[in-house]
Amino acid sequence: MTTEANDRLLRVVNPATGETLDTLPAATAREVDTAVDQAHRVFDSGVWAARPPRERAAVLLRLAELMERDAEILARLDCEDAGKPITECRTGDVPGAIESIRWFAEAADKVFGRTAPTGHDHLGLMSREPVGAVAAVLPWNYPLAMAAWKIGPALTAGNSLLLKPAEATPRSALHVARLATEAGLPDGTLAVLPGYGAEAGRALARHPRIGALSFTGSTATGRRILADAAETNFKRVSLEMGGKSPQVLMPDALDFGADLIDDMIEAAFLTMGQNCTAGSRILVHEDIAAQVVARFTAAAGALVIGDPAKPDTRTGPLISTAARDRVSRAVDEAVAAGAVAHTAGLPTGLHPHGAYYPPTVVVGAPDGSRVLTEELFGPVVTVQTFASEQEAIRTANATPYGLAASLWTHDLDAAFRLARGIQAGVVSVNSYSEGDITAPFGGWKQSGFGGAERSTDAFAQWTRQKTIWIRTR
């Protein structure tokens, strides 16, 4: 994790060991200004924006090929910077990022305009044009994958993109920028600005010449970005923020056997629970609650905790010792108030300075406790019971967030009722899933604002609609 926010350096730290991996210059507000000026010059020149869509696609497809070539480098950078298990990076994050770049590139000439239903003496044409100089501010939990979600549609649409990675995890985005140059992207079309949110991030949010900004991160930071945009140029802002996602298990859920427990474990503990869609609240019908808790806690206790660079590790460290201590305090508070925490603890032999916290299942947390209400961003899940569908829906919706949910039942009617009743942007049935690149991703309530990621819907964040009205004679 980075430290000493008042100096001009970013210290990138391995959360598994506490050792410094790299020290980088932190972008200043003045350097943001310079990058914005260059992005505008490049955009206005038309060297990228005026290229035919298929030519832009060819460059981005070459970028995807180079990322594939350097897949192991990218996986190791995210593993080291974020403490993510290397197998998760190799099999999930890196292939997903490559797929995102490739998919949006292939969609370059497949996003069509419209015509208005006019009379014979008029023609109404609606087209989408790139915004110009745009920005994206990234989180640290999926450094490469989230960069690709922004780079793909923003550059495919013809914009010049300024990308600010999280302070803790800048290196994979920097490597992608070098690959983009190798792929033939014009200089200044993609600028990666490692820096602190308080300076570089805020400079992007307040800059009068940034036309659109996409942010993934905390709800608190999203609020500040939205306020900054409102106080300056009313730039288009899209926010993908926090979550407190429920996993709803109906009375027949145990019929899914090992698939149920495997998906519940992934939902709860993928990326050590540092995942905005993490299924951190298990809502289980009272008839099967005891069996679910027994099977789930046994599976959680069997997860391999260790060095994220080892292929068999399933649970690595949290992003920092501060994050670990925050999670620990929330669990301790719940236990002090009467909850029971099930955990197998940490194995021996972990690095003494690693930010490790064991997978933990909290049962009986009192209403209002932080483990139930706050996005802890750690390997902690709570278990609550319900007696009816209506109670399950009420409990699922008892949160200011609305990003994702999963539900398990063979009853198709019940599945539709629950999916319609739960207030979330993505609801998976009989699986833990966010969908794939073809499906929009975005939250409700305090989880999302202003746009969706993935699918052709993502282009709306990075383009402006223009109507051309022609009178014919």
Image: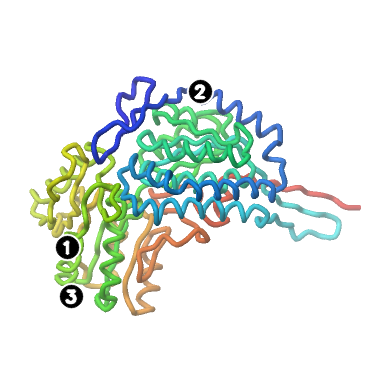
Residue 42 left/right relative to 405? right
What amino acid is labelled 2 in the image?
Glu
What residue does disc 3 label?
287
Examine the rendered structure and indicate whether residue 450 appears above or below residue 254.
Answer: above
Q: Amino acid at mark 1?
A: Thr
Q: Are marks 2 and 3 in contact (CB under 8 Å)?
A: no
User: What number is the disc on residue 344?
Assistant: none
Label 2: which secondary element: helix
Quadrant of the image occupied by residue 252: bottom left
Which element is circle 1 on? helix
Question: Which amino acid does the dot numbered 3 rest on?
Answer: Asp
Image color mode: rainbow
Separation of marks 1 and 3 at Cα, in angstroms: 18 Å
Disc 2 to disc 3, C-alpha distance: 60 Å
Question: Residue 315: where, in percent of width, then height?
Answer: 25, 52
Residue 158: x and y in percent read 64, 42
Sequence-wise, which precedes: disc 1 or disc 3?
3
Residue 87 seen by the camera: yes
Residue underneath mark 2: 31
